């Protein structure tokens, strides 16, 4: 039963990844088009750059005071959190299964 719930958390992480793949590129395109100063800080090809991901997870996009940017970046941030949470819980349940077999 524990491994079943671990699998459900993996499925949750996959759902978060799907949302991330939708909203994060849209956020980066919005940054490129409307906020060239932020785009310069994030650099070209920012999709998987650790600095750009940290910018998203910290919520630094709120400093731009752009409702459209927040509307795109907030779901990307939530989905990144869902990925981290889902994989973390799946790992914890798998570890619990291995310890308490």
Image (cartoon, rainbow, N blue to C red):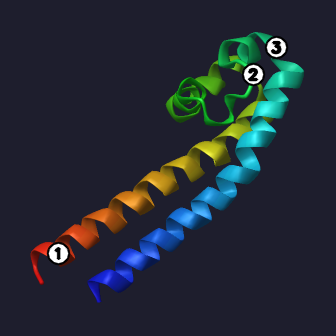
Direction right: furthest residue: 33
Counting every numbered tag in the picture gives 3
Tell me the residue that label 1 is attached to: 98
Label 1 and label 3: CA atoms lie apart by 49 Å
Where in the figure is residue 80, as x and y percent of width and height? 55, 48
* Numbered disc in front, either 3 or 2: 2
Quadrant of image for the C terminus:
bottom left
Q: Is residue 94 above or below residue 83?
A: below
Tell me the residue that label 2 is attached to: 44
Where in the figure is residue 60, as x and y percent of width and height? 58, 23
Disc with the residue nearer the chain's start (3 vs 2): 3
Residues at badges 1 and 3 in contact (C-beta under 8 Å)?
Answer: no
Label 1 and label 2: CA atoms lie apart by 43 Å
Which corner quadrant of the image does residue 56 belong to?
Answer: top right
Residues packed near mark 3 inside 10 Å, few (<14), some (14 to 19) or many (20 plus): few
Which corner quadrant of the image does residue 68 belong to?
Answer: top right
The tag on residue 36 is 3
Task: Tell me: 33 left or right of 8.
Answer: right
Q: Residue at x 83, y 30 (%)?
A: 30
Disc with the residue nearer the chain's start (1 vs 2): 2
Direction bottom: furthest residue: 1
Q: Residue at x 75, y 18 (%)?
A: 39
Which element type, helix, strand or loop, lies under badge 2? loop
The tag on residue 37 is none
* Closer to us: 34 or 93: 93
Label 3 and label 2: CA atoms lie apart by 11 Å
């Amino acid at each position: 039963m524990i491994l079943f719930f671990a699998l459900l958390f993996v499925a949750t992480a996959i759902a978060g990844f799907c949302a991330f793949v939708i909203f994060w590129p849209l956020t980066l395109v919005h940054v490129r088009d409307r906020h060239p100063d932020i785009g310069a800080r994030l650099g070209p090809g920012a999709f998987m750059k650790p600095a750009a991901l940290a910018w998203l997870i910290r919520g630094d996009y709120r400093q731009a005071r752009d409702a459209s940017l927040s509307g795109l970046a907030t779901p990307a941030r939530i989905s990144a959190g869902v990925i981290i949470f889902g994989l973390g819980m799946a790992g914890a349940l798998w570890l619990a299964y291995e310890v308490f077999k």
